[in-house]
Image: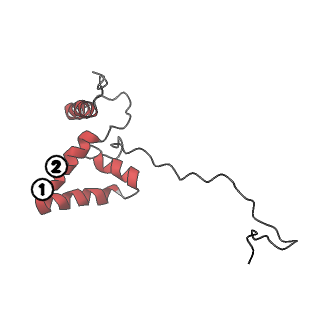
Amino acid sequence: MTDAPFSAPAGQPTAPSTDQPTAPPLRPEARRSATDRMAGGVCGGLADYSGVDAVLWRVGFVALTLIGGSGVLLYLLLWVLLPPAPTGDEPLSPLERLARRLHAAVNGSRAPRPPV
């Protein structure tokens, strides 16, 4: 036995060697969705992040709600903890303004002033 590395026989092409490891594909940041939303955009944002359809997330939250009531609490918690998606110039609802203020208070940052 030898400690010499394996080399291909003469005349056969070898695969090009890459010394740098390939970077794993980047995941998008977990955010609430601005486009796929029914209430707060939590399920749409989780769908974008995980690749699981938003309908399945919604069914999961409904199932958790029917089983023990934790689905509603978990949804509200994620609504506050997940940062909002960037929005255009459309006015924000009062609930969305409240969620953004709570998110800023939880994360210790100042909430941006929403357009009036």
Identify which residue, 70 or 2, lies in the foreground.
2
Residue 96: give x, y in percent of width and height.
Answer: 24, 34
Q: Which mark is residue 73?
A: 2
Residue 98: give x, y in percent of width and height.
Answer: 20, 32
Q: Is residue 39 visible?
A: no
Q: Amino acid at mark 2?
A: Leu
Residue pictured at 41% horizontal, 56% vertical: 51
Q: Is residue 100 above or below residue 53?
A: above
Q: Amino acid at mark 1?
A: Gly
Identify which residue, 93 or 110, lies in the foreground.
110
Per the image, label 1 sits on a secondary structure element best described as loop
Q: Is residue 20 above or below residue 101?
A: below
Per the image, label 2 sits on a secondary structure element best described as helix
Estimate how packed mark 1 is, as few (under 14), some (14 to 19) or many (20 or more) residues with alpha carbons within 10 Å.
few
Q: Which residue is mark 1?
A: 69
Residue 75: give x, y in percent of width and height.
Answer: 22, 49
Q: Is residue 16 visible?
A: yes
Residue pictured at 20% horizontal, 34% vertical: 95
